Image: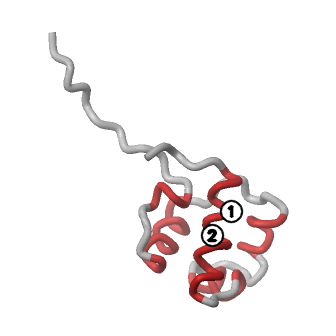
Amino acid sequence: MTTATPAEVRATLVALAADRGESLSALSRLIGRNVAYLQQFVHRGTPEWLNEADRLVLAQHFQVDERRLGAREPWVPSTNRE
């Protein structure tokens, strides 16, 4: 899995909310933000990325891999040893 682009993160969030019949304002409250926070994230692109704590809460709420919401690929050590 590769890191999602900001546009992909926004589309994923909208789709996840729609699938559950949840509003962006309710999800904003879930992460402890003002009711317009995720609406602005989705439609205005502000902020560009979800912060780590918000992303984690949303990923747990929707039971999805955090990378779908913009987390970077984890660092892993190289398996090539010389």
| Quadrant into which the C terminus falls | top left
Residue at position x 67%, y 52% in the image: 6
Residue at position x 65%, y 55% in the image: 8
In the image, residue 59 lies at what x, y percent?
47, 70
In the displayed image of the protein, which residue is found farthest to the left?
Answer: 82
Q: Place residue 15 in its image quadrant.
A: bottom right
In the image, residue 42 lies at what x, y percent?
75, 66
- Vertical comparison of 76 with 47: above or below: above
Instruction: Kindly indicate whether the residue at mark 1 contacts the one at mark 2 (C-beta within 8 angstroms).
Output: yes
- Vertical comparison of 22 with 64: above or below: below
Q: Residues within 10 Å of mark 2 (few under 14, many from 20)?
A: many
Residue at image mark 2: 13
Residue at image mark 1: 10
Of 14 and 71, nearer the camera is 14
Q: Residues within 10 Å of mark 1 (few under 14, many from 20)?
A: many
Q: Tally the numbered discs.
A: 2
In the displayed image of the protein, which residue is found farthest to the top?
Answer: 82
Q: Which mark is residue 81?
A: none
Residue at position x 73%, y 58% in the image: 47
Give the left or right position of residue 34, taking residue 27 as reference: right
Q: Helix, strand, or loop for circle 1?
A: helix
- Residue type at tag 2: Leu
- Vertical comparison of 27 with 38: above or below: below
In the displayed image of the protein, which residue is found farthest to the right?
Answer: 44
Residue at position x 84%, y 62% in the image: 44
Q: Helix, strand, or loop for circle 2?
A: helix
In the image, residue 14 lies at what x, y percent?
67, 72
- Vertical comparison of 47 with 73: above or below: below
- Residue type at tag 1: Arg
